[in-house]
Image (spheres, helix red, strand yellow):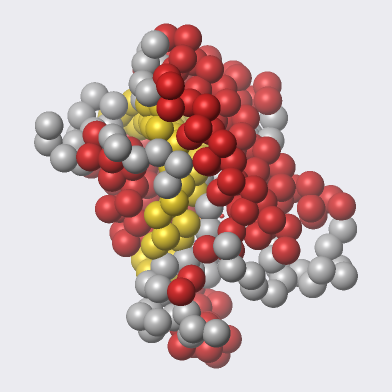
Amino acid sequence: MKLFDLTGQRVLVTGASSGLGLHFAKTLAAAGARVAIAARRVERLHDVVGELNAQGYEASAFALDVTSRQSVIECMDAIEEELGGLDVVVNNAGVSDTKRVLDYNDRDWHAIVDTNLRGAWMVAQEAARRMVKSGREGSLINITSILASRVGGGVGPYSAAKAGLSQLTRSLALELARYGIRVNSIAPGYIATEINEAFLGSEAGERLRARIPSRRFCCASDLDGALLLLASGAGRGMTGAEIIVDGGHACSGL
Ligand code: NAD
């Protein structure tokens, strides 16, 4: 076995129109996977598919709103029709907000928990049902956060949703192991992307960086090793695990 090789593996990345999801799709395609990239606005994915195809990679775009069971089912149906099924799913779609506990309203709560937790649950459940039905083994990878285990101001609902997803990963791992389906998570720390560039470069960002033991924010490519390990046969002995990639932030001293 060639470690970390994904040749012929069919991989779905949710929320792949930007940020980490987009990077994950490119990394998995470069490792040989046929990638299905999914997001709410499918038209935003066509450029990415074109870019990947131009580099000789196999990629297709699918419409998906992870907060809708109907949309998840339709997306999986479309993938099954085009790729014949899935071997790996990266539950990446997520949303966050920053408000004080006293200022959040029910709509905020539902939007955050619905996407990060219920959405990941529905995608994992529908994918696992199809893997079991077809007798295929597989790997599900949930993107959590160091906020699943540590706390930070202003992100209560997000932290609760990610903590839920972290525990859900272990429940899924327990029940799906008998079918050869591995379920693990990656908990990133603060990853420098275009979206948080301004904040991470600000004074507040500098104060945050000073509390990270390695004194640096990770970048998207720092997640590649964990992603390829969990997606490929190199991680065949792993299920129910969480890999933290945060430059040591989660173990910073009190
Ligand atoms: P991002 O906002 O760039 O990406 C999130 C993606 O999810 C977007 O493409 C968005 O369109 C998609 N999405 C949102 N709601 C959706 C829905 N209902 N259906 C389908 N897609 C939907 O943010 P990111 O930083 O790339 O985050 C990716 C994942 O990594 C998220 O789960 C996030 O919580 C997690 N994460 C990010 C960091 C970080 O520092 N960037 C740290 C820890 C965890």
Which residue is at a point 59% across and 59% down the rendered structure image?
148
Q: Does 42 appear above or below 212?
A: above
Quarter of the picture containing the N terminus is: top left
* Farthest residue, direction left: 2
Q: Is 159 situated left or right of 85 in this image?
A: right
Q: Does 174 appear above or below 129?
A: below
| Residue 71 % position (x, y) | 64, 25
Q: Nearer the viewer, residue 18 or 183?
A: 183
Q: Is 6 situated left or right of 163 in this image?
A: left
| Residue 249 % position (x, y) | 46, 74
Q: Is 236 situated left or right of 132 in this image?
A: left
Image quadrant of residue 28? top left
Q: Is residue 199 visible?
A: yes
Image quadrant of residue 50? top left
Q: Nearer the viewer, residue 83 or 225?
A: 225
Q: Is residue 15 visible?
A: no
Q: Nearer the viewer, residue 248 or 62?
A: 248
Which residue is at a point 34% across and 40% down the rendered structure image?
238
Q: Does 90 appear above or below 190?
A: above
Image quadrant of residue 52? top left
Q: Does 84 appear above or below 144?
A: above
Which residue is at a point 40% across and 82% down the rendered structure image?
213
Which residue is at a point 20% across and 29% down the rendered structure image?
7
Quarter of the picture containing the C terminus is: bottom right
| Residue 152 % position (x, y) | 64, 73
Count all numbered tags in the image, as a single digit. 0
